[in-house]
Image (cartoon, rainbow, N blue to C red):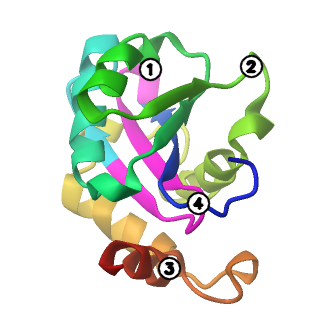
């Protein structure tokens, strides 16, 4: 969905912490640009990623879960479990093509302001990650006609 007219299409990515020993997952909805953080204190191999991604997707109303797009990382090896469990389409970007998930790549720059490279992400609590997400989701954006992602996402969830 390149035209961003149908809500419920998500992009997912991980940011890796200090010494490659911790990570966080972030989901962003393509129409609203709404962010959902998932802290991953136990690791980020493929099995862990599936479990944590399920937790993140459970936070999304079923009618707003149509697809999710990943990069080519091996951490997404359990994608079939996600597709079967949630009945959603799973897409992968072409190798070395971050622009195919441009929204999450843009969001990563904002997230890295809060969690710079080298941060031990295992110390980030879910409450803190949700706090950061609420700040980012509350920022009005020119690309959203000066509405915030939170305002648009809330409207999508109540209709």
At x 42%, y 82%, the residue is 155
Decide which of tag 2 and tag 1 comes sooner along the chain: 1
Q: Position of residue 134 (x, y in %)?
A: 38, 73
Q: Which of the labelled discs sits on residue 20, or is there none?
A: 1
Q: Kindly identify which residue carries mark 2.
A: 94
Can you tell which of label 4 and label 2 is closer to the viewer?
4
State which tag comes first along the sequence, 3 or 4.
Answer: 4
Mark 2 residue element: loop
**Vertical placement of 137 versus 114: above or below?**
below
Regarding residue 91, the answer to whether it shows in the image is yes
Contact between marks 2 and 3 (CB within 8 A): the answer is no
Of residue 24 and residue 53, the one placed in the foreground of this image is 53
As measured in the structure, the alpha-carbon distance from the residue carrying label 4 to the one carrying label 2 is 22 Å
Find the magenta span and give its range.
18-37
Q: Which residue is mark 3?
A: 152
Sequence-earlier tag: 2 or 3 = 2
Q: Is residue 100 left or right of residue 115?
A: right
């Amino acid at each position: 969905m390149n035209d961003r007219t149908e809500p419920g299409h998500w992009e997912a990515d991980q940011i890796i912490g200090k010494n490659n020993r911790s990570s966080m997952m972030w989901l962003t909805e393509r129409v609203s640009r709404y962010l959902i953080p998932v802290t991953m204190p136990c690791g980020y191999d493929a099995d862990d990623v599936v479990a944590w991604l399920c937790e993140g997707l459970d936070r999304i109303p079923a009618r707003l879960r149509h697809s999710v797009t990943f990069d080519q990382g091996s951490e997404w090896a359990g994608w079939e479990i996600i597709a079967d469990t949630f009945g959603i389409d799973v897409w992968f970007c072409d190798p070395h093509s971050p622009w195919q998930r441009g929204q999450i790549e843009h969001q990563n720059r904002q997230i890295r302001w809060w969690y710079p490279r080298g941060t031990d992400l295992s110390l980030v609590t879910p409450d803190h990650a949700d706090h950061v997400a609420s700040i980012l989701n509350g920022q009005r954006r020119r690309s959203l006609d000066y509405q915030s992602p939170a305002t648009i996402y809330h409207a999508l969830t109540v209709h």
